Image (tube, grey):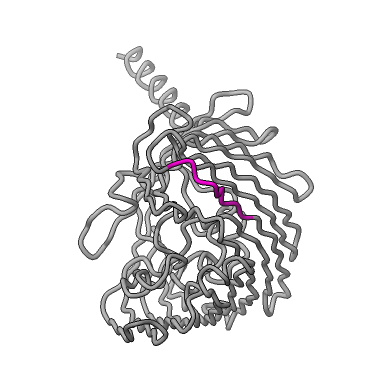
Amino acid sequence: MKKTLLAAALLAGFAGAASAQSSVTLYGILDAGLVYKNVKYSNGPVDVNQSNFGMAYGTQSGNRLGFKGVEDMGSGNRLTFQLENGFDIGNGTAGQGSRLFGRQAWFGVENDAWGYARMGRQTNLATDYFGALDPFAQGFAQANIGSVFGSTNTYRLSNALKYQSPVMGGFQAGVMYSFATGIDSAYVNNGVNISSGSSYAYDTTNNTRQISLGAKYANGPIYAAVSYDKLYGASGIAGGSPDASPSEWNLGASYDFNVVKVNAVYGQTRGGWMAGQNNQGNSGAAISVGPQVFGNGLNIYDTNWGVNSYQVGLTAPIGGASKVFASWNMAMPNGNMQEAYNAKNMSAYNLGYQYDFTKRTNMYAYVSYANNYGTIDGLTSTVLGVGLRHQF
């Protein structure tokens, strides 16, 4: 009897040791509210004045349910994974093209000494590094940094290998390559749309590929980041072989004065556009008035496309439970784009507020106004929203 009890105790001890070396965490975000949107356009063959009001989901943060896992493999090495599902809390349907784990789906190995290597569906380095420079934290639709810096817009790449170094004196850098991005493409030059979807043909030239590079520096109140992304279009299928090869580089920095945090970002995009942010639910009227509309969910290949992007922003705490944040975003088309599409400077003026009821639950409100939305002359977009977010 004593031997049985001893064996049981030893087994319990071993089980406890094993569970201490590996873990799986369940987490998620629920976000819902109300939004009013108005889109006006008076410079085309038909005047447009559309207003909508109703429920909105995932405004501050996309609704999600995910799993994170880690296993200690010894010698400082750890196996890690993340599976994250995005969904519409209004009707329960899956997001990100109805993928089961459309937000994140990767596993890899990491070590404090050499960094990490991951494979699967994951965000690019511009997304990873520039979220800290956006007062709207890559949320709030039209108001966020992705409205004028497409590659920073929670930009996910499928079939990707990613390496990131450890932090060294405040510096960190990474490189990433996607064998098939899974993002649909529009080739404006020859009027052909190519669907990437979730399939992977293994034949390199039949897939849309992408390289992503990035580096950041964080030390006390100072934060700085730089990124570069380049797309390579599918050439082995009908309608492929585009002359354009979209690329985007960005540079930004912030400084936290405690009473206010300020930031500035600059970037250039050439040869097309990388699926940027929409204005809280795309407007059919906006998309129909010009091929240069941002945020239509496609990577756009177009040799005429060239945009210089700017953002200036600030975040200021108010007491211990609330904060106000604001930004000005601008997309300035270059000469080729102006000539091809009569493109104009797009400016967006954004203001937001957050109040924390607890560490996990907060309410928010925001307003955003954009003129020449999508660089289309005379197209304006106004969005106002309020909502509640819970993190678990």
Give the answer, above or below, for where 343 lies relative to 302.
below
* Left or right placement of residue 200 versus residue 71 in this view: left
Q: Is residue 246 magenta?
A: yes
Which one is nearer the viewer's eye here, 204 or 239? 239
Query: Residue 340's x, y, as percent?
Result: 53, 68
Which one is nearer the viewer's eye here, 175 or 254? 175
Query: Residue 79's x, y, as percent?
Result: 51, 30
Residue 20 visible in image: no
Quadrant containing the N terminus is top left
- Start-end of magenta stretch: 240-248
What number of labels is visible?
Answer: 0
Quadrant containing the C terminus is bottom left
Residue shown at 58%/39% (left/top)? 176
Dominant secondary structure, magenta: loop
List the single residue furthest toward the right: 169
List the single residue furthest toward the left: 91
Query: Residue 304's x, y, as percent?
Result: 56, 60
* Left or right placement of residue 284 versus residue 347 in this view: left
Give the answer, above or below, for where 270 lies relative to 197.
below
Residue shown at 28%/60% (left/top)? 88
Residue 23 visible in image: yes
Query: Residue 219's x, y, as percent?
Result: 76, 58
Residue shown at 69%/55% (left/top)? 226
Q: Is residue 105 magenta?
A: no
Residue shown at 42%/27% (left/top)? 202
